[in-house]
Image (spheres, grey):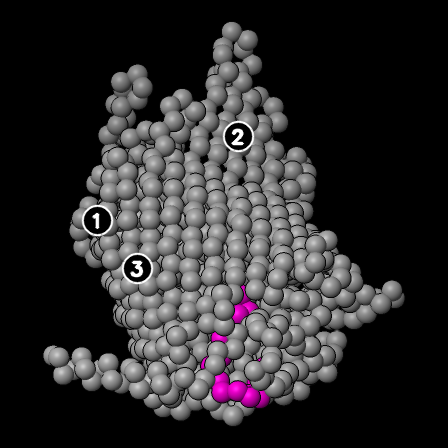
Amino acid sequence: MRKIIAILVFLFVALAAICQNKVSVSGIVADAETGEVLIGANVVDSAGHSWSVTDNSGYFCLHTVLPANVSVSFIGYATERLTIDAKTKLPLRISLAPDKQMLGEVTVVAQGRKQGGNVSDMSIKEISELPSMGGKPDIAKGMSLLPGISTQREGTSVLNVRGGNPGENMYLFDNVPIIYVNHLGGFFSTFNPDIINDIRIYKGGFPARYGGKLSSIVDITQKEGNKNKHCGSLHVGLTDISATAEGPAGLKNSSYIVCARKTMIGALLLFASYLADQNYLIGYGFYDFNGKFSWSPTDKDKLTVNFYIGDDYLGLKSKKPTRFEDPQQFRLGYMWGNVMASVQYKRILGSKTFLSAGISHSRYRLRTGYKIKPEVDTLPDVRSRFLSSLDVTMAEASVKHDFFKFWNMEAGVQGEFQSYLPTYNFEQKNNIYRPAAFAYLSTTLQFLKYSSATLGVRANGIMSSTYHDFSIEPRASLTFGFSPNHRLGMSYMTATQYSHLIFTSGSIMNNEVWIPSGGNINPAKVTQYSAEWESDFLGGKLAMTIGGYYKSSTDLATYKDGFTNFIGDDNWESKVETGGIGRAYGVEFLLRKKAGRFTGFVGYTYARSFRKYANINNGEEFPYDFDRPHNFNIAANYRINEKFTLSATWTYQTGLPYTPALGKQYVPALTEEGELYMYECLIYGERNSGRMKDYHRLDIALTYEYKTKKGRDAAWSFSVYNAYFRQNPFFYYYNNTPYDYFLYPSADSNSSALKLYQVSYFPFLASFSYKIYFGGK
C-alpha cells in the first residue's frame, strides 16, 4: 500500500510540474448587442492545448500556454479571435456579434457542450418555431417531444420523466425552485419564453449540486435584459396576451427585464355561461409576472434580483336561487399559484475560482371556498374555506475551482426552512416545519484526451422536534471519448425526496397537495443506472444519441383507493397510501440536425413504468397511470427564406392504461333517516390492465416575419393543432347510454349492460398569434 501511495504521489507531482507552464484564463462571453451572457459558447486554444465551454453564468476557465491564440464561437454568432499574453487584463469580457447574414449552413464546433443521453435541451428559438395550441410557444410542451419526456394527457404541459410523476421534477428559475409550474389544469406552463435564456433537463446522472427530487431537474436560466438600450415586445394570441420590456437600469453595467402575461378567455367564458342554459356563471383566468434586475459593479462581480408571481383563479356563481326545497344561491371560488423572490451574488475569484451565493423564498398555495345563501331569512349562511400551502426559504453558497486543465472541483452548502400546510379550514392551523441542510462535493478528472470521470456526493439532513433524517447520495459518471465526435457514457445516481406530491389528474382545478415525510410517511428514494452512446457527424451538424436506463424507487406515496383530496379532513394522513415501490426502464434514441435551413429531430422511446402498493390492486404490481411503452416524435423546421418559416411535428404514443369494469352490482346503504336502500356500483378488474386507443396527431405552423411601416420587427404565426382530425381519447367512462352527460348508476336506472365510451377534446384547432418588437429584436 505504501508503494502504491508513493507512485500516486509521484504521478500527481509530475502532472503538476507539467502544468506549471500553463496559465488559467477566465472570463465571461456575452452578446455584443444586448450584453446577455451566452451559455454553451466554445472557447478554444487554437494551438490545441485546451478548450472550455461557458456555463449558466457565461463563465469559462481555459488552461493554456502564453502567448495563446484563442477563438470563441457560438451558433448564430460571428467567431471572435484574440491573442492573450502576459499583459492581457483578466478576467476577460468577450463580446460576440450576431451573424445576421447567417442563413445557410452553419459549422458547429465539435468541442461544444456535450449533452449526453441524461440531458435534454432545446433552444428558445427552436421552441418558438414549433406548432402550438393557441398559437403561442409553450416550453414544457416543446420539451415533451424529446426522448424520455412525455406529458400526462393531450394538450397538457404536465411532464412525466422516465416513469416518474410530476411531483418528482424540480424546476429551477436561476437556481431557485418554483413549486407549481402549470396553468389551466396543465394546459399551459408558467414559463414565459420571452424571459428565458437557456433550458436544460437532467433526466438522470444528476450533478451533485442538484437534489431533493427523484426524476428530473429542469434548470432554467433567465435573461438579464438588454444593457445597451431600452426595447420590448407585445405578443397577442387567441388565449392570452403578454408584454416584455428590458433595458439599462440606470447604474453602470446594470439591466432590467420584466414580463407579464394575462389570459383573455375570462370575459368570453363569463359571457358564454351567461347565455348558456344553465344556472351558474363561470369565470376563469391566470396571470404571470416575471422581473429581474442585474448589476455588474466590476468585471468580477454580479448581483441579480429575481421576482415571480403567478396565479390561476376559477369562480362559479348561481344566476338565481336553486330549485331545492329551501331555495338558495351559491358562490364557489378556487385560487392557486406561486410567489418567488431571490437575491444572488456571483464573483470571479482569481483566474481559477468562481463563487456563487444567494437567498430565496418560494411559496405555493391552493385556496378554495364556497358560500351558500338561503333565500329564507331565518336560515343562516353556510360558508367554508380551505387552504393548502408549501413555503421554502433557502440560503446557499457554492464555489467552483479549476486546479489544472485535467482537474476541477465544485462544492456547496444549502440551508432550507420548509413549512407545510397540507390542509387548513381556517379554524385550526397546523403547520409542519422542517429545517433542512444540504452539502455536496463533486470533482471531475479528464484523462486520455477525450475521456473524463466525475465523482460526487451529496449529504441531506432534516432536523425538527418531531422528525429527523440523514442520507448520503453518491453520484458517479464516466465518459470514454474514442474521438472528438464519438463518446460512450455511463452514470449512477441515488436521490432522496422528503416531500410528496399528492394529486388527482384530469381536473381544470388544481388539487395538488404537498405533504412532508414524517411519522408513517418515509422519504422517497431512487437509484438509477444509465448508459448512452453519442456521435457527431458532418462536422457537428448532425448528432445522434442512443441510451438506456433502469431506475428503482421506494417509499412512494399516493391517495388510498376511494380518496381524491384532503379538503376538510384534519386527519389527512389516513388518506395516504405509503410504502410504494416503483421500477422503470427504457431505451431512448435521438437523431438531431441543428444547423442549416432545414433543422429538426427524430426521437423514439421504449419505456415501461410500474408501481406496487400493499393495499392497492391486492398488493400486486401494476402499470403506472402514465405508462406509455412506445413514444415516437418527429419535429421539422424549414427556413424558406428570410420571411417565412414552416414547421411541423408528428407524435405517436401508446394509449394510456385504465382500469376496466367487469360488471356492476347492487350495494345496500342507509339514508340520513336510517332507511335501507340499494344503489348501483361498478366491479373493477385489475388496476390499469386495459389500454386506451393509441395516440397520434400532426401539428403544422407557418411563421411570417417582416418589417412594419415604422421599421419595427414583427411576426405572424399560424398553427393547426391535430391537422387530420384524430379523435384521441382524453378519458374513458362507463355508462348505460351514450349521452354527453353522465348518468350516475342508481336503483332506478334500467339494468342494461354497461358500455365503454370515450371523451375527446381537441379534434382540430386552428389558431394564430401576432408579435411586435419595440427597439429591435
The residue that disc 2 covers is 332
Closer to viewer: mark 1 or mark 3: 3
The quarter of the displayed image where residue 628 is located: bottom left
Q: Nearer the viewer, mark 1 or mark 2?
A: 1
Separation of residues labelled 1 and 3 (CA atoms): 24 Å
Q: Which residue is mark 1?
A: 579
**Which residue matches tag 3?**
458
68 falls in the magenta region? yes
At 48% from the left and 34% from the top, the residue drawn is 367
Residue 9 lies in what quarter of the image? bottom left
- Pinpoint residue 108: horizontal percent, then vertical percent: 56, 85
State the quadrant of the C terminus: bottom right
Tell me which amino acid carries mark 2: Leu
Q: Is residue 31 visible?
A: yes
State which quarter of the image contains the N terminus: bottom left
Comes first in the chain, label 2 or label 3: 2
What residue range appears in magenta?
54-72
Q: What SS does tag 1 mark?
A: strand
Vertical comparison of 17 with 555: above or below: below
